[in-house]
Image (cartoon, rainbow, N blue to C red):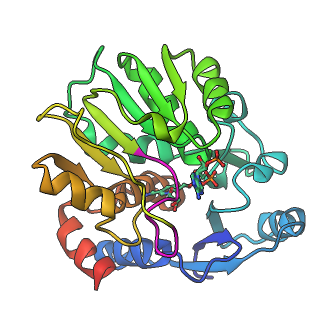
Amino acid sequence: MTPYAEVIGDPIAHSKSPLIHRFWLEALGLEGDYRATRVAPGDLAAFFADRAADPAWRGCNITVPHKVEALDHVADPGDVRASIGAINTVFRGEDGALAGTNTDAAGFWAPIAELDLADRPVTVVGAGGAARAILWALARIGVGPVTILNRNPLKAAALLASFGLKGDALPLAAGTPPAALLVNATSLGMTGQPPLDLDLSPLPDDAVVYDIVYAPLETPLLAQARRRGLATVDGLEMLVGQAAVAFAILFGQEPPRDRDDELRALLTA
Ligand code: NAP
């Protein structure tokens, strides 16, 4: 009985999670497998009932479109519903019952943990599920005013209020004010989507531009930031960061992060 975990979503064929988790399983010499499983909307209850009865199943990661609905099917010991409002990892709790958590916030934060953002202004572009995890993390570390730029600024204003953040919610066309960190949390810049067209000139020279989109790795926004000489963080860093927290939950061991260069080469091959 080989232990296994998986990532579920619809569609799911594009997911890089199996590559990441299998790389770590092999690197650690752990017996186990990690798969990608398409679960259609409406099939979540049956999926969790089936897996709960399978002793080899360690848990799963969850991607679009199930991150919110999955909360209805598992326990929520950390009250993620009231904070981030979506889960991306389901595991077996100590009593064997299925429980959910969210590792996106930790994954987002890990690559910029060394930055001193206390009381410094931050701009977040986007107000979807990923933005919620990012804003939750920013609220926890006490950044300065947060400007959210979003196609729908009312949705952004609701997020500012729900995370107790001071700042502004503005339409995309308003552009970024000076900020120590600018994060793209929209799907703009993804393969097949228009680029995020933003004037970066208001940013100071020590600003960091972070794009959580990871396909392509060098988005037009990051290319523009590099041309301006700004420091950048790409979406693969968050992807690997959230997977690392999930791997420890699912397989009970820390992944070998000293082999990130090899993993990155594999993911970008
Ligand atoms: P989501 O909940 O669907 O939110 C999408 C966001 O993009 C919303 O703010 C939406 O604006 C905006 N948007 C979409 N199309 C737009 C357009 N044509 N013009 C202007 N704004 C547009 O998606 P999500 O789960 O937050 O994911 C967002 C992106 O982050 C995706 O590319 C995803 O792959 C990436 N992501 C990366 C990681 C990682 O680990 N690197 C983790 C999670 C997500 P409205 O609010 O106005 O609809």
* Res. 110 image quadrant: top left
Q: Quadrant of the C terminus?
A: bottom left
Q: What stretch is highlighted in magenta?
A: 184-193
Q: Residue furthest front?
A: 173
Q: Quadrant of residue 224?
A: bottom left
Main secondary structure along the magenta-highlighted residues: loop
Q: In this view, does 185 lie to the left or right of 260?
A: right
| Count of numbered tags | 0
Q: Where 108 sits versus 177, above or below?
A: below
State ligand 1's quadrant: bottom right
Residue 89: in magenta span: no
| Image height of 82 relative to 28, above or below | above
Left or right side of 213 for 68: right
**Identity of the residue drawn at 37% across and 72% down:** 216
Residue 187 is inside the magenta segment = yes
Q: Where is residue 24 in the image (x, y as percent from the top left)?
A: 35, 71
Residue that appears at 77% across and 53% down: 70
